[in-house]
Image (tube, grey):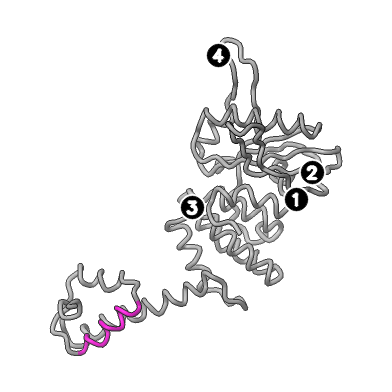
Amino acid sequence: MAKIPHEALHRIFRDEPGLFTRTLRRVLAVDFPEVEEVDVLDTDLTTIEALERRVDTVLKAETAAGGRLLVIEPQTEPSDEKIPGWAYYLSYLESKYAIPASLLVLTPKRSTADWARRSLALGPPERPSLRVFPHVAGPDNMPLITDPAEAAEDVVFAVLALLTHRLDADVEKAMRPLVGAIETLEPETARYWFEFTEGGLGEGCTRQNWRNIMKTMSYGYVSEFRREGRAEGRVEGLAKAVLAFFEDRGIDIDRADRERIMNCDDEDLLMRWLLRAPSASSAAGLFVD
């Protein structure tokens, strides 16, 4: 199960063999052959102990046009240090397996996508010895899928599209359509993609918004984020009950104390405050040790 955005952007291709072809065709208009079957290869490309080389995901694919190696690399920030590594991956893999290798770079940032599309070269600038030409998918060419029917047509691609847009201000527009699409899947598969998406969104408000949508679901299982949502609901209910006692007794609470109560996530502490609230003459009476 993917737990961080970087992992999610390449591991998703291990779960869905045909996603590589669909991404190149839909996003980049590249007529890549249909992938029929893949094997996940060892990502350790180290040849001597002094220099470790690890690719994120590499798949050996059987396609309609013969064998292909599919190399998937998420990249958040521009980094010229990656160019020699990518060149090494491709040359090493082609030399070892004697079949063509294609590199797909995925990024949630437009600036990084622009960097990866420029001429990535090795050697003197006046006459480069080697150039690397990756396929690049980013928020500028990956669709933001906000239509429920479109999301349901290809759920896994819709997950990838959402994760690629995770840093966009409009990403929430694609969340509910994706939720509806995932809910059409078989329960265990649906749970996997709900939690995969949660992990791939990273820490912060975007993941919390996804969790908030999960809390409204009527789905028939209790996942990790739904259990957490229920706990959050109990905590919020206790905090509101504490404030309600003061409001009912006509006792004013300043903004700082109100925020301290509402932002508290310690259920036991909130319960102690709730027991003190009927007799406390001010919010300060709650906070005594």
Q: Position of residue 62 (x, y in %)?
A: 83, 43
Give the residue number, with chain letter if any, for mark 2: 61
Question: Of tags 2 and 3, which is closer to the observer?
Answer: 2
Give the residue number, with chain letter if any, for mark 4: 125
Q: Residue at x 68, y 49 (%)?
A: 13
Magenta span: 267-278
Mark 2 to mark 3 CA distance (whole Å): 35 Å
Q: Name the amino acid type tagged 3.
A: Asp
Give the residue number, with chain letter if any, for mark 1: 17
Mark 3 to mark 4 CA distance (whole Å): 40 Å
Provide the secondary structure element on which disc 1 rests. loop
Residue nearest the observer in this picture, 27 or 257: 257
Q: Residue at x 67, y 42 (%)?
A: 43
Provide the secondary structure element on which disc 3 rests. loop
Mark before the other along the chain sequence, 2 or 4? 2
Q: Quadrant of the C terminus?
A: bottom left
